[in-house]
Each structure stands twice: as structure tokens, then as C-alpha cells.
Image (cartoon, rainbow, N blue to C red):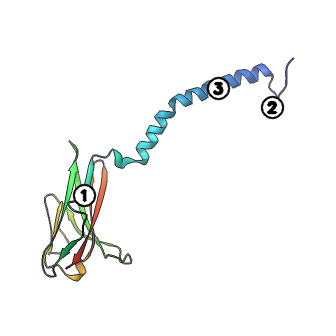
Amino acid sequence: MWIRYDHGESQPNFERRHRRLGGMIRLRQQWCPVWVFCLFLVLCPELYLSLSVQFQSEEPVYVILSQTLVLEARLDLADGEQVATVTWEREAEGRTDRGKVKVAEFPGKAPDARVTTEQQGATLRVTGFSREDRGIYTVTATGTAGSRSSAAPAREH
């Protein structure tokens, strides 16, 4: 006895097609870990990037007016990794209406003569610290594997 299905297939054809699909499903299940791993690599690059940036201390830096602000970041690179640029930005603490202002970039010259970078951009110096210099400083290192950032507040003492 042959059973006709709604889409016009006889039972042997339906079973043959179902077996083929079942084989494809099993094949897909075998490849599932590979796809999960690829998706993981795309969604979580920070786990395998060979570049990291962090400040020596997570505590705020307090500076006396007219003195020199020194911020030191540690750039950790894997073998063969190179940093193309290091950018320093400042945002007024507690105020996001002004946005971030680029303070310095390495390599390159800072827009303000009071600002210098040292140690391939890892250290920022602002001489003659003023109230306008207060805020959250963000350092961003960009290399061949992507970019990483870290932030620290600088406050008036």
C-alpha cells in the first residue's frame, strides 16, 4: 500500500528524502562545535587579542594646580605585535555634553604645547595643570590585532 502525502510524494520517496535530510542533520551536528568556535572568535575578540592597555593604578590621580600631571599606562604586547598609534583623550568628569577631547597622539605632536608623550606614547605629561585639565583620561592603543583602551580620572588636589 502506497500512501500519498499532501505534497504528492509516495512513501518510498518521502522516506528516501527524509533519510537524506537526517544525514544532513547529523552532519550539521558534527560541524556544530566548529561554528560555535567561529562565532565565539567573532563575538569575543578581547579574549585572544595580543594587546592590552592598563594604568599602573586604578585610583584617581590628584594633581596640585600649576604642577605636572603624569599618567602612566602599561602596554602589553605579544611577540611580533606592533602598536601603530597611542591616543590620549580627556572627558570632563561627570559631564558627557562636551564629549571627549583628543589630548595627544603618538606618533605625532600634541595640539597643546604643555602636553607631551613618552615611552612610545605610554606616558602622558601635562605641565601647568589647570582646572580645564581635570577629567577622565582614556588611553587607546591601536595595533595589528585591534585596539584596546583604559581610563583613569585626574582631579585637582
Q: Quadrant of the C terminus?
A: bottom left
* Residue 127 disc label: none
Instruction: Report helix, strand or loop for mark 2.
Output: loop
Q: Residues within 10 Å of mark 1 (few under 14, many from 20)?
A: many
Depth check: 71 or 11 in front? 71
Q: Amino acid at mark 1?
A: Gln
Rendered image quadrant of residue 28: top right
> Residue at image x 43%, y 43%?
40
Up/down of 56 relative to 45, above or below: below
The residue labelled by disc 3 is: 22
Residue 9 in picture, x, y percent from top left: 80, 25
Q: Nearer the viewer, residue 82 or 72?
A: 72
N-terminal-most mark, 1 or 3: 3
Q: Residue under label 1, please give it.
A: 54
CA distance separating discs 1 and 3? 51 Å
Check the image and name the residue furthest to the front: 59
Q: Quadrant of the N terminus?
A: top right
- Under mark 3, the amino acid is Gly
Q: CA separation, marks 1 and 2?
A: 63 Å
Point out the tag, 1 or 2, that comes first from the N-terminus.
2
Furthest toward the right, the residue is 1
- Residue at position x 20%, y 60% from top? 56
Q: Is residue 43 left or right of residue 83?
A: right
Residue 22: x and y in percent read 64, 26
Label 2 belongs to which residue? 7
